[in-house]
């Protein structure tokens, strides 16, 4: 019995040692979601140093990227990509995130190559299509970005980022009525990222509805701008003020 008790004790100690990173990880996620980036990231980095699953490491890398720590995000992603034992689906997530970094660095051809490779491997998911659709729009190739975003929309027509890309796709093609239809439906989902409201404002301005465009830009400015936001707060503020001035002149 004493031997069994000792074995059980060793097992429990080993288990707790293996799981010791879960407490700071969960606390870090909770703090980040609550908006306390400094405390949240401190906890997540502590958890990472103690050992996390590859899926959890992906989340830490995204948090680093979200709060502007691109170098730290790349370190985590590079280590994941060098790990031959990681499941292909997890590695695809890491590759997709490196494509996001490439887009931020205006390395469009690199991002396109990464995403097309993931697609050819059949390792697609909603996050992939959200990035893929936006990347396709940046190519300015109408046939390419239309096909990409139609495919993304068929995959998940409920995802707000995919819907935003889909609406932007029609705006770029000059189909304002279709773009407005998509954005009107998207607003019912209360998207929590500024690009959706900014892009809808662009559609509304083109259609002559300056008042509602101003309202949409106001909504955009009420939301958080992070390291993964594709537009700058300053640009939205300038556009907002410009349309407000135009509206005042018309009145």
Image (cartoon, rainbow, N blue to C red):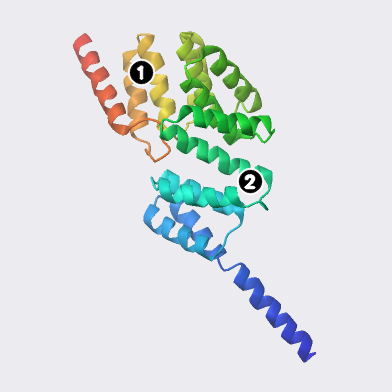
User: What's the CA distance linking mark 1 and mark 2?
Assistant: 42 Å
The secondary element bearing badge 1 is classed as helix
Residue that protrudes farthest toward the bottom in the picture:
2
Task: Report the residue at 76% width, 91% height from top.
Answer: 2
Instruction: Tell me, yes or no, if residue 137 can be seen here.
Output: yes
Q: Quadrant of the N terminus?
A: bottom right
For label 1, the crowd category at 10 Å Cα-Cα, with few meaning under 14, some 14 to 19 and many 20 or more, is some
Instruction: Tell me, yes or no, if residue 183 can be seen here.
Output: no
For label 2, the crowd category at 10 Å Cα-Cα, with few meaning under 14, some 14 to 19 and many 20 or more, is some
Q: Is residue 38 left or right of residue 119?
A: left
Q: Quadrant of the C terminus?
A: top left
What residue is disc 2 on? 90
User: x and y percent of residue 143 in the render?
Assistant: 56, 12
Task: Report the residue at 51% width, 23% height from top.
Answer: 165
What residue is disc 1 on? 212
The secondary element bearing badge 2 is classed as helix
- Depicted 177 relative to depicted 99: above or below: above
Q: Is residue 129 left or right of residue 104?
A: right
- Depicted 76 relative to depicted 197: above or below: below
- Depicted 20 relative to depicted 240: above or below: below
Q: Which mark is residue 43?
A: none
Which one is closest to the eye, mark 1 or mark 2? 2
Task: Report the residue at 63% width, 22% height from top.
Answer: 151
Whichever of callouts 1 and 2 sits on the residue coming sooner in the sequence is 2
User: x and y percent of residue 128 in the render?
Assistant: 59, 34
């Amino acid at each position: 019995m004493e031997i069994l008790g000792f074995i059980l004790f060793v097992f429990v100690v080993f288990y707790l040692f293996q799981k010791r990173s879960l407490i700071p990880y969960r606390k870090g996620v909770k703090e980040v979601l609550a908006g306390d980036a400094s405390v949240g990231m401190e906890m997540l980095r502590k958890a990472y140093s103690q050992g996390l699953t590859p899926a959890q490491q992906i989340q830490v890398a995204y948090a680093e990227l979200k709060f502007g720590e691109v170098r730290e995000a790349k370190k985590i992603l590079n280590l994941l990509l060098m790990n031959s034992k990681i499941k292909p689906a997890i590695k695809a997530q890491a590759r997709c995130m490196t494509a996001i970094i490439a887009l931020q660095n205006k390395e469009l051809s690199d991002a396109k190559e990464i995403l097309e490779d993931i697609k050819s491997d059949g390792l697609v998911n909603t996050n992939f299509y959200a990035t893929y659709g936006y990347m396709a729009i940046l190519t300015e190739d109408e046939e390419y970005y239309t096909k990409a975003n139609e495919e993304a929309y068929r995959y998940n027509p409920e995802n707000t980022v995919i819907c935003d890309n889909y609406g932007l796709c029609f705006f770029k093609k000059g189909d304002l009525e279709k773009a407005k239809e998509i954005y009107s439906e998207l607003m019912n989902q209360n998207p929590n990222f500024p690009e959706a409201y900014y892009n809808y404002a662009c559609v509304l301005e083109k259609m002559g509805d300056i008042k509602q465009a101003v309202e949409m830009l106001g909504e955009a400015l009420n939301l958080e701008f992070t390291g993964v936001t594709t537009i700058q707060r300053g640009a939205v503020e300038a556009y907002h003020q410009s349309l407000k001035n135009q509206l005042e002149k018309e009145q």
